[in-house]
Amino acid sequence: MIRFDGVTKQYPDGTVAVDDLSLTAPTGKITVLVGPSGCGKTTSLRMINRMIEPTRGTISLDGQDTSRMNEAQMRRGIGYVIQHAGLFPHRTVLDNVGTVPRLLGWDKKETLERSRDLLSRVGLAPELADRYPSQLSGGQQQRVGVARALAADPPVMLMDEPFSAVDPVVRDQLQDVFLDLQSELGKTIVFVTHDIDEAIKLGDQVAVLRVGGKLAQVSDPAFLLAHPVDDFVADFVGRDRGYRSLQFQPAPKLPLAAERTLLVGESTAGVTGDWVLVVDEERRPLGWVEPQRVSGEVTSEALHRGGTVARASGSLRGALDAALSSPSRRGVIVDDAGSLVGTVRAHEVLSLIESADRPDVDLADQFVAPGRETSP
Ligand SMILES: Nc1ncnc2c1ncn2[C@@H]1O[C@H](COP(=O)(O)OP(=O)(O)OP(=O)(O)O)[C@@H](O)[C@H]1O
């Protein structure tokens, strides 16, 4: 657990970057610091590992005041990841990842095994291990940065905008890899971003700071979206917060309809209706076809692949998005293995949302089993 108690940082020129911050980052959880530029996020983060010394107040790690701890020893227990990864340019990827274990005196074989294992965990192909950072894409460099910070298995990780220098698609992938890793590793993480969507996606707890370094609100993301404390937080979390908050409502009670399906290579002869879902042998959805536009066998080229696919174990946001983005308006719902379990329409998701908002309705009574056949 990391605890800020009345922490203030005033720089020598008089700037108050952080003002009387009290905050707890729980063990094994991700705490996100978010807020506009200059609100003191980086300063707060760097005070944890004493790269910056607080002017007033205390920061403790598992109950121990960091100002009384041996600085070098303390930092060994804290991984640090920054924007642009900050890799050593003249060292290979493998050497970069092994930096801290080597400093800690691990033997060569152990360091090598650990580094290779981490590279694969962050989703980097083994053949990239001998490249230099300049020979990697921005997203790959960030993965190496995360692997390097994890190498000595520190219980605490500080991450300063680690994914903001890459494009949105790569950022999304990096966030997913990061969440997967965290579900396995359970580190105590403080993560800085200026991007509220990233904060909502990653944070177990989100702390919103305002310029002047004052804490505006700290809570779990669902509560933050539903109950911003004031106009500043409401503006900062954004206008579509109602829609985004759906991601915290699980979707297990969806009234799923069975869906008529075809395989690639099967004939559309005799198939009526507007859209038919095409799946592979494992019933994983591939896309939709309009039977009247396909004469004969379904080909991959005829597929409309635009719709998103939502997991039955996922959220109402995913289910609603699947329905809205589907060319048939029937949202495709899959199990955790990616196989089709049924489809759902937007109005059905909306009914669930509305009934979920009424305290007298028990969602457990809302279940409708798959089996209702829809004409394709
Ligand atoms: N060394 C310094 N000397 C004086 N002022 C500083 C120094 N470092 C940061 N500041 C100021 O402290 C305030 C907080 O800066 P900080 O970098 O912590 O903010 P931030 O929220 O991380 O910003 P950004 O999102 O733009 O990176 C800003 O007003 C900044 O100009």
Image (cartoon, rainbow, N blue to C red):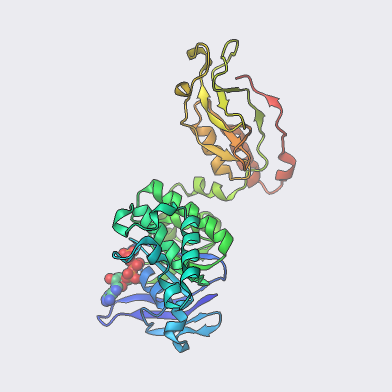
The answer, for residue 130, to whether it is visible in the render is yes
The answer, for residue 197, to whether it is visible in the render is no
> In this view, which residue lies farthest toward the left?
13
320 displayed left or right of 355: left
Which quarter of the figure has residue 49? bottom left
Q: Position of residue 266 (x, y in %)?
A: 57, 18
Q: How many marks?
A: 0
Please name whichever residue, 330 or 212, is drawn nearer the observer in this view of the structure. Answer: 330
Name above or below for residue 204 compared with residue 54. above
User: Quick one: quadrant of the N terminus?
Assistant: bottom right
Please name whichever residue, 96 or 343, is drawn nearer the observer in this view of the structure. Answer: 96
Q: Position of residue 168 (x, y in %)?
A: 38, 48
Q: Which residue occupies 53% across, 50% down?
A: 245
374 displayed left or right of 320: right
75 displayed left or right of 220: left
Q: Position of residue 151 (x, y in %)?
A: 47, 68
Q: Which residue occupies 53% across, 36% down?
A: 322
User: Quick one: quadrant of the C terminus?
Assistant: top right
Which quarter of the figure has residue 364? top right
Please name whichever residue, 194 or 120, is drawn nearer the observer in this view of the structure. Answer: 120
> In this view, which residue lies farthest toward the bottom?
68
Name above or below for residue 124 compared with residue 65. above
Q: Position of residue 316 (x, y in %)?
A: 58, 43
Name above or below for residue 51 compared with residue 376. below
> In this view, which residue lies farthest toward the right?
365
Q: Which residue occupies 54% across, 42% down?
A: 318
Please name whichever residue, 113 or 249, is drawn nearer the observer in this view of the structure. Answer: 113
- The quarter of the picture showing ligand 1: bottom left
Which quarter of the figure has residue 27? bottom right
